Amino acid sequence: MKRISVGVFKLTSCSGCINELIYALVKHPELLKLIDVKYFTELQDVNALTELNVAIVEGSCVREEHEGILKKIRGLSEVLISMGTCATLGGVQSLRVGVDVSEVKKYVYLNPEYVDAYNDVKAVGELIQVDLSLRGCPVNGDALASIIKKIVIGGWPLEVYESLCADCKRAGIECVVVAKGTPCLGPIVSAGCGALCPSFGRGCYGCYGVKDKDLDPEKIFEMEKALGRLGLSKDDFYSLLKGYSMSLVKSLKI
């Protein structure tokens, strides 16, 4: 079986999704027989930026340099995958959107003048064509392994589109809203984590991002009111949406 050439690239992120990819390679060593890693700075010292069968991008775009990097990667790649919520939806960096970034930098860096960043935060798909998006904060390593195997064998992963509530129902997890009155974003966010937080009695905070194919602003507003009655403030509700779904917040004009 022919190996596929793969490059892994990092923009602005915590590297959590790249760690999950490394864990997936350790857990599924057979993957290393299927791929030829050409570029992966977190994994190897020698890297070649060359034509690739698959490029995997982690992180969001926060400065002009990133835009050029993304366009170059796109031009070299047959298939481009945005990996994780930062790359797919903007990520937690988006919490600063709406605030002058120069003010934010003062609270974070000793020498903020050395940090180049613009006020906006952009998901990869806002700048270049993305062939496959895999959400998660962090992404699910087993899902990554499955996708790589599928691409090597031939074909395309089947996208299952459902809310986090479906994960709870399959796992037999008691609804934290009904049983405890705990605020939870489950009905409006995407499944994929296996309902990790609800399995520990906590409400979901939407790290896989808001569902985008069957939601409109009116449904978001109704969810905000419902969770408000359970004690989640309006500011906290929209902070969660910004932190994990900024590109959708933009598109829905919320």
Image (cartoon, helix red, strand yellow):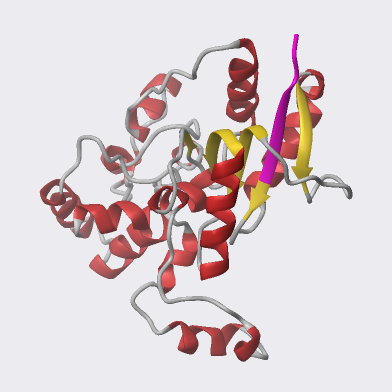
Q: Nearer the viewer, residue 43 or 109?
A: 43
Q: Report x, y in % for residue 226.
A: 17, 51
Q: Is residue 174 above or below residue 17?
A: above
Instruction: Identify whether 159 is placed above or below 236.
Output: above
Question: From the image, which quarter does the C terminus lie in?
Answer: bottom left
Task: Give coordinates of residue 163: x percent, y percent.
Answer: 32, 32
Q: How many numbered badges does the structure rendering display? A: 0
Magenta segment includes 3 = yes
Left or right: 69 in relation to 202: right
Image-quadrant location for residue 159 = top left
Main SS, magenta residues: strand
- Front-lying residue, 76 or 91: 76
- Residue 63 appears in the rendering: no
Q: Is residue 20 left or right of residue 231?
A: right
List x then y, in percent, for residue 33: 81, 19
Note whether residue 33 is visible.
Answer: yes
Whether residue 48 appears in magenta in the rendering, the answer is no
Image quadrant assignment for residue 164: top left
Which residue: 40% across, 70% down? 120
In the image, 202 versus 52, the foreground residue is: 52
Which residues, given as a range, are shown in magenta? Answer: 1-8
Residue 57 at x, y percent in the picture: 59, 46
